[in-house]
Amino acid sequence: MIIAGIDNGVTGSIGVLGGHFREFWRTPKFKHQKYTKKKAFVNRINGDMLSVIMLDPGVTLAIIERPMVNPQRFQASTSALRALEATLIVLERLEIEYEFCDSKEWQHALLPGIKGSEFLKKASMELGIKLYPEHEELIRKQKDADGLLIAHWYKEYKLKE
């Protein structure tokens, strides 16, 4: 089984584990002019690149972190939901099964006792480098290893339940 861990969103990441694959990517995106009258741009998921990331290693299951949806953070919630929809379209077209997980599920198992977003990001980066040192440069650039750790958590914890 080849598992993709998807840290949802245009600033997220994707980790693929299984067989001889131990890959890590930033979520592929592109800037697109916003649909409002005011000239502005939004980041959108690059579906073609996401397809290549899923097809090349032969991903059979994607674990997607549920998007943050908070009425107090309307723009961030809109972006997260737009990214989720684009990701689901790609996975469904490629006929790749997917499941959702809450961030707290994998964080509780892999980063126990750590609270606060800035501490979780740092701990994610440190654990990702420890487990997957070949991706240290990209993990440091991304400032976390969430996509890899989601796949790792599923493979090491959920599959063994």
Image: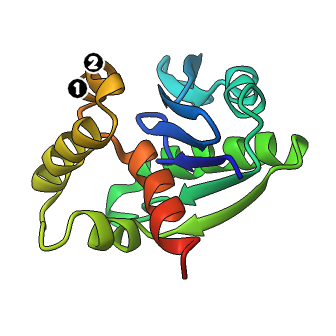
Q: Are marks 2 and 1 in contact (CB under 8 Å)?
A: yes
Three-letter residue code for mark 1: Arg
Across and down, in percent, residue 4 comes to 60, 46
Residue 108 placement: quadrant: bottom left
Q: Is residue 6 visible?
A: yes
Residue located farthest toward the bottom when viewing the structure as drawn: 161
x, y (%) of residue 68? 42, 61
Residue 63, picture quadrant: bottom right
Q: Is residue 121 above or below residue 98?
A: above
Residue 122: quadrant of the picture: top left
Q: Residue at x 68, y 43 (%)?
A: 87
As displayed, is residue 141 above or below residue 106?
above
Task: Quote the CA–CA distance across marks 2 and 1.
Answer: 5 Å
* Residue ID at (33%, 21%): 138
How crowded pointer 1 is (Cα within 10 Å; few <14, some 14-19, many 20+) is rated as some
**Residue type at the position of mark 2:** Glu
Does 11 appear above or below 79?
above
Report the residue at 17% width, 42% height from top.
Answer: 126
| Residue annotated with mark 1 | 140
Task: Give the secondary structure at mark 1.
Answer: helix
Q: Quadrant of the C terminus?
A: bottom right
Residue at x 16% of width, y 50% of height: 123
Q: Residues within 10 Å of mark 2 (few under 14, many from 20)?
A: few
124 to the left or right of 79: left
**95 w.r.t. 133: above or below:** below
Which residue is more in the foreground, 8 or 24? 24
> Residue 67 location, x and y as percent?
49, 59
Residue 66 visible in the displayed image: no
Q: Which mark is residue 20?
A: none
On screen, residue 13 versus residue 92, left or right, reads: left
Check disc 2 and report the residue beneath it. 137
